[in-house]
Image (cartoon, grey):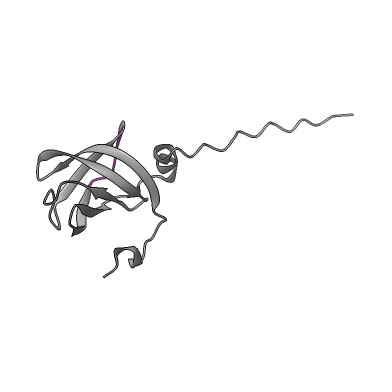
Amino acid sequence: MNLDSIPRSSERRPISLTVKSRVRSRVVFVDLIDISEGGCKIRGKPGFAELGDRVAMKVGTINAPLGAIAWVEGALAGVAFEGAMHPAVLDFLCGDPAPAPRAPQLRRIL
């Protein structure tokens, strides 16, 4: 099975961060490879997680939704979030600029 061919309900966005997580009640630092509203791909040391393990992650100052390991391939693993991460939070984490505020439209009253 090609992991890139798995259908996604939301767009995966590339990201490169080291995050503090908890797997099997122990602290593990992993590299966050990509993220979406429904999950993420992480890289750790081989054997750091097994299929079905519960995962809690803190991305910067933001707690990601709780998740479970959906797949493992060597040092890579996929996390399926139990809830959804808000798109604005993803924009913030991925460094996408917020849309510029629109200037109010001024009208002349004659």
Report whether 69 appears left or right of 86.
Answer: left
Which quadrant, please, contains the C terminus? top right
How far from the left and from the top, in percent, is residue 4? 34, 63
Task: Depth check: give the residue in front, 77 or 75.
Answer: 75
How far from the left and from the top, in percent, is residue 54? 16, 49
Name the residue: 17% across, 56% down. Answer: 74
Task: Depth check: give the residue in front, 91 or 44.
Answer: 44
Look at the image and tell me whether residue 84 can be seen.
no
Q: How many marks?
A: 0
How far from the left and from the top, in percent, is residue 76? 22, 53
Question: What secondary structure prevails in the magenta region?
Answer: loop
Read off the magenta span: 62-66
Task: Depth check: give the residue in front, 101 or 70.
Answer: 70
Report whether 95 appears left or right of 71.
Answer: right
With respect to residue 78, does 26 lie above or below?
above
Look at the image and tell me whether residue 57 can be seen.
yes
Magenta segment: does it hold 25? Answer: no
Magenta segment: does it hold 63? Answer: yes
Name the residue: 48% across, 40% down. Answer: 96
Report whether 76 appears left or right of 106.
Answer: left
Name the residue: 37% across, 44% down. Answer: 15
With respect to residue 9, does 19 lie above or below?
above
Which quadrant, please, contains the N terminus? bottom left
Which residue of the protein is positioned furthest toward the right in this rendering?
110
With respect to residue 24, does 20 lie above or below?
above
How far from the left and from the top, in percent, is residue 79? 25, 52
Name the residue: 56% across, 38% down. Answer: 99
Q: Quadrant of residue 105?
A: top right
